[in-house]
Image: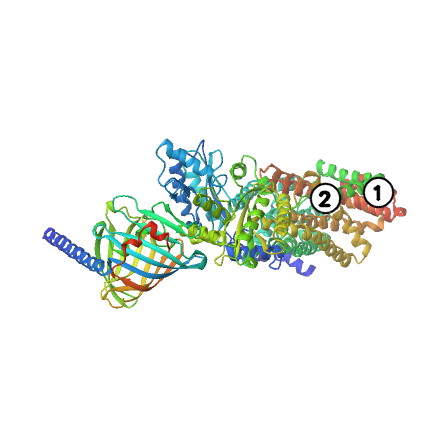
Amino acid sequence: MRIIICIVCLCSSALMYGQSSNNAFDIIKKYQEASSIEDLQSTIRYKNISKKGRVQERSLEQYIFQKDASKNTYNFLLKFVSPADISGTSSLTIQHSSKADDQWLYLPALRRAKKISASKKGDRFMGTEMTYEDLSNYLSEPMEDYNYQLEGEEVVEGNTCFKILATPLPHAKSKYKKRILWIDKATSQQVQAHFFNKKDILQKIFSAKDIRKINGTNIYRAHFIKIENLLTKNRTEVYYEDFVINKGLDKNIFSKSYIETL
Amino acid sequence: MHKFLRMSYTHPKSTLLIFIIITCLFGNGMKSLYQKNSFAGELPTDDPINKNIEAVKDVFGDRSMVMIGLETNTIYTEDAAQAIIQLTDELKEVPFVLRDEVKSLATLENVSNRDWGLSSDGFLDPIPSSTDEWKQLKNDIAQNEIISGSLVSEDGSLTVVAAPLDDDFVGGKVYDALLDIKNNYKGVGKIHITGAPILVEDVQRGISGDSRKFIPIAIVFIFIGFFICFRTLAGVLLPVAMVIMSIIWTMGTMGYLSLPITVVSNALPVIMIAVASSYGIHFMHAFYRLADEYDSKEALIEATLNKIASPIFITGITSSLGSLSLLIFKIKSLQEFGIIGAFGFAYATFICLWLLPSLCMFIKKPKLKEHGLNNRIGLFTRKITEFSLRYRTPIIAGYMFLAVAAIWQASHIQVGDNYMKFFPKSHDGRIAATTFNDKLDGVRVMDIMVDASSFENIKDEKFYQQLLQFQNEVAALGAIGGIHSYTQVVEHIAKNLNDETKETNWTNEEIAQYLMMYELSATPGEAGMLYDEDYKKAHLQVFMTSSSPEVHLATYQKIKGLFADQFQGNAEIKFGGDVMHRISLGKYIVTGKIQNIIVALIILLLTTLIIFRSVKKGIYTLVPILFSLIMVFGFMGLMGMRLGISTSLLTAMIVGIGIDFSVHYLISFYKYESQGTKTALFNTCGQTGKAISYDAVSNIVGFSVLSFSGFLPVQHFGWLLAFSMLLIYINTLVIFPILFSLKKESQLTPALVQPKNLILKN
């Protein structure tokens, strides 16, 4: 009798796990759809704040173009606008799925764009606490690289959220052992994420606030995000303004010759 | 006072119980003792150098550096590369390490110009796999001024994994973690660990370790001396109990007062042994000497106290006040030692006068044991007295000559501690520091903060050029291994972006944009180490290959001069870091030492004036002590011993022992003075002279053991303690007879002296 009860319990657990996994997948799918873009432009003001409270502040314009939806690759153009002595400095990244990305840097003082090494997943993005892997995941959740598990519901900053454990699949070569994502039920936006390093230590906390609809669209976007590195105690705060999403960005701006005219 | 003292032997059990309870209470206080190995807070807050050190710290943090060196035939192999990556990961996990500022070939970007553009891959990401790739890496490192000679030796046999520590780091924890890395390392080559926090910990542990090893041996020798003197077990055990109790009370008080154990207070047990054993030997010597004259123990103890209580009390009070004279130093650990030393000497006096009488009640009433050695010592002290009286004039001339020579030698004493020379040559810490000094930039760091406010900011091209010129001039100074600053970063990026074709007169915009390029890959901490967030202040880390305080001081003064010449008052410079700490400490050691000697002598004079109610007698007390002080410092100058923090304590010890010998001698002399000067002198050298002989010989032999330590501070401290003891002893026995013979020539009455009887009687 006991054996039968055990078997029933095991089967039930397996079914529940499957259901939970499916639910998680659906939630992430919805989140991916809600956050995915064809193109995006906005202004950004970001602050890198060190453990000692040293603040480094910059403003820039960002232009993002989804190059290949199926392969989750993008083109990025970032143009610094302040402080004045670095205004015009620009970075262009063309992502490729099958080879290393192409990157150029334009310094007004040089008066030409210089090709630079492609950034790696674990490299810091523009000196912030966000890595290129974090940024890619934030722009579009790479569902083919992760296993998802629904771990219940929690209220974060007043938003009722699904709590989802995302574990990378071996082929993903992620820098993390796992991530825990909190997806807002109402907007399907990510409001919080915990990043655990390979030693399973909580390394970073991502939080998104001021989530509101972009003018003239049904697309929600966080207008403030914060990434805290718990190991180094550094943090980055990013303020977004003037979002323009899916309005048909000119593809030609993502070229070396264009950034040399900036 | 005697009524109160009487209670100790009329109620011996109660007295003993009370002492045991008090000792337990102080023992409990010892639980609160803690070690402080850093020099934080040592300097006065209003000190100009300290103010600058703090100002630099406020902007750039303390950033004490720890370094792991990998030494192998060549670092350009896969095994070495794997080892560097592994050591980098391990260093990131060390407590208090600023993990985002760990510098190594595994963390830094190799910004190098290539045919296709600008490479910014990691040096070891990926690890080269072909001969050409290794050749490329070797070439990149050789061309990179930030790396070559700083992070990788020019011959490619040594590379460093370095990291700054958090401001509130605990040296012991960092040291243990690094030692674990070193001990568990199984890769290619050999590991060295170094950096200022490691050196401090190495010194502290080395000194503590050798002290723990040699001090018990010294104690055993001292008490063997006691046994030779008294020939009874009680004659050894009672003073031992007294000395141990004095140390427990003193250390317990330190615990209750939250005073830390520092490199200075480490010497406390040694000085307590010297002083407390001296009190004990006087008491026990009198106790045994008077034994045959009294029938009951009570009467014997009463007589012993009548004879010895006053000089011990006077000695104790004067030594305590002498110790308090250390408060004149502006160095915190020396001030703390002054306070705790005062407690210690007072406790030793109290325990000697109250505990020893009660303990004597528990032993059998002794019988005077005459033995050959006792007689020989009595004969020796008598011969010294006779010799002094017979050759008075040549001795006076000799003393004058010695005093002048000693003062001249003392003026050559080198000030400050040279850490490198603390270690035996085979010590890992010394080998590591020597290897880093020989092959890389060095291990000692002077921090320089240059304020560019008057130039708008550090990105100003005029400021930049002047700073570059200043740095080049500083780098050309002898003891400078290298300078790390933002100009290195700008120059390296500029050189690689501009294909090495352009002149190095960068515009404001170029400097700003090259710095921004650096910031895009650097962590906030890395950038924060080079300049402040407003770009107003630049941080220059000047690495030095010498650990000589004289070289540090001379370099500091030269750098100040170079800066004034270069910037003509248009920018402000502030110095910080470990090296400046030492320079400032050296300054206070010199001024503090002079003031301390003067104050200690004034205290002695005032105390003896009150006791003897005579200026002349007061001055007499000082003479042997003064000569001993001069001679000890002369000896230090002659032997090349440095006046550092620990050797600064010698005055307290010399005053403590000197006053003990002088007061006992003088009280005895004045007691017999009415019988004529010579009789009084021979009686004194036959009684007190014996006691101080046993005390001196036991301590000289005991502390000489410390000279076997491999650690120079322990070795020198042992030599100096033994030598001081010898000098005080000789000077007391030689100078007083001469002084009194000068004073009362007419009263020299040889007919009254019966030397043989005196020897037998004593």
Q: Amino acid at mark 2?
A: Ala
Position of the N terminus of chain B by quadrant: bottom right
Residue B166 % position (x, y)? 47, 53
Find residue A152 and report its image quarter.
bottom left
Q: Which sits in the foreground, B66 or B57?
A: B57
Q: Which sits in the foreground, B243 or B100?
A: B100
Is B688 placed left or right of B714 in the picture? right
Position of the C terminus of chain B by quadrant: top right
Of tags 1 and 2, the one toward the viewer is 2
Q: Which mark is residue B24?
A: none
Q: Secondary structure at mark 2?
A: helix
Q: How dense is the environment of label 1, judged by Cα within 10 Å: few (below 14), some, or many (20 and up)?
A: some
Which residue corresponds to mark 2? B410
Q: Which sits in the foreground, B728 or B678?
A: B728
Query: Does the image show residue B383?
Result: yes
Q: Amino acid at mark 1?
A: Val
The chain holding disc 2 is B
Q: How dense is the environment of label 2, judged by Cα within 10 Å: few (below 14), some, or many (20 and up)?
A: many
Asked if labels 1 and 2 share a chain, the reply is yes
Residue B94 % position (x, y)? 42, 47
Is B709 placed left or right of A113 in the picture? right
Q: Earlier in the sequence, mark 1 or mark 2?
A: 2
Which residue corresponds to mark 1? B753
Q: Is residue B110 above or below residue A44?
A: above
